[in-house]
Image (cartoon, helix red, strand yellow):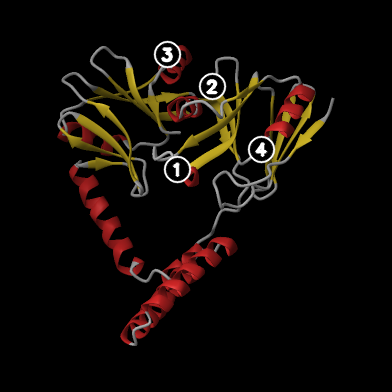
Amino acid sequence: MNAQILPVAGAMKGTRCPKTRLTSDGHTLTVTDNAGGRSASLSPASLYRYDYSVDGSGKRSRTLTGVAALDPDGLVMLDLPGDWHPPHLRNFSAKAGIPLVDGRNDSSARARRILAARGSGWQRFRGIPVPRTTKWNKALSVCAGIAGLGLMVYLGTIGMWGAWRSVSSLGRFLLEMIEAKWLMVVFSPALLITRPLLTGMHRWQAGRGAIVGPPGGPYLRMKSSRRLSVYRRTGVIAEVPVEPGTSVLLYRYDDLSGIFVLDPAGAPLLHLPGHWPPAALHRFTERNGLSLAIHRIPRNEYTTLATHCPQAIP
């Protein structure tokens, strides 16, 4: 029996509702991303409804929700961030004949582990237009930042800081709504200085091997000689113990790549899927006394590591 479902709200509180449509024809699902102009068809073994804290704070505003399509081994074939109404989702899965696992009460650690265990051909359909930053956007953002700085100074000199705070808060809210985040410097002019300064500092530290990963995260840093920390802009989102013999595996499995942090016995401690430059990882592990292995692994080894890892960042 054919069925169709649409998300009812954004993946996080206050975000836009994805323009994603999920339809079924028997056990075959077809997802269409109307914002990105792409689609995919697959036959999953189950659907997983997730709801987890992205930064470990447990705050509702930092909770990400969505649906993932899993293969028979529990690996994610397709990730669909968005708020899918539970009764609608139950009816859809029943009509499609695909089991639904409601993971809203799962711990964030379990949800992250499941979502980080990606299967071959993994895809994520956000259903949100990708913002395009052109050279004109950059030039205008600099000019806008200077104008915003001038306005802030003027209001400050006449004792109207309260007015500036109100204008700044309202402006940031409106820019989120119209998806013009490149103009954020108008209402946060300090970004003109702090953003390039912090980016430059991050690159300098990465060049020395003190950290590894992109400025926005996730990136790794040795918080102490015995703790390896994972950071995002909001701060530390995960930590694992480090002892003599702890190692890092940069893996390649089919079309996927990522890293596992392993204990001295070879058991997984942390999983970070995605692209990690080998040279940058080499500098980091060498500086911090960790061993690094780089090789392709078979499906059974990858599945065992990914599905048994206590901590992961999707």
Is 64 or 271 nearer to us in this picture? 64
What is the three-letter code of the residue carrying label 1? Lys
Numbered tag placed on residue 75 in the rendering: 2
Instruction: From the image, tell me which residue sits under label 3.
Output: 301
What is the three-letter code of the residue carrying label 3? Glu
Instruction: From the image, tell me which residue sits under label 4.
Output: 84
Secondary-structure class at tag 1: loop
Measured in 3D between alpha carbons, the distance from the residue under mark 4 to the one under mark 1, in whole angstroms, is 20 Å
Secondary-structure class at tag 2: loop
In the picture, residue 314 is in which quadrant? top left
Question: Picture coordinates of residue 250 (x, y %)?
Answer: 34, 27
What is the three-letter code of the residue carrying label 2? Leu
In the image as oriented, which residue stretches furthest toward the bottom? 158
Is 195 or 94 nearer to us in this picture? 94
Drawn side of residue 230 relative to residue 302, left or right: left
Instruction: From the image, tell me which residue sits under label 1.
Output: 59
Measured in 3D between alpha carbons, the distance from the residue under mark 1 to the one under mark 3, in whole angstroms, is 35 Å
Q: Which is nearer the N-term, disc 3 or disc 2? A: 2
- How many residues crowd mark 1 within 10 Å: few (<14), some (14–19), many (20+)? few
Numbered tag placed on residue 17 in the rendering: none
Measured in 3D between alpha carbons, the distance from the residue under mark 3 to the one under mark 2, in whole angstroms, is 13 Å
- 167 over 259 or under it: above or below: below
Q: Which is nearer the N-term, disc 1 or disc 3? A: 1
Q: Which is nearer the N-term, disc 4 or disc 1? A: 1
In the picture, residue 99 is in which quadrant? top right
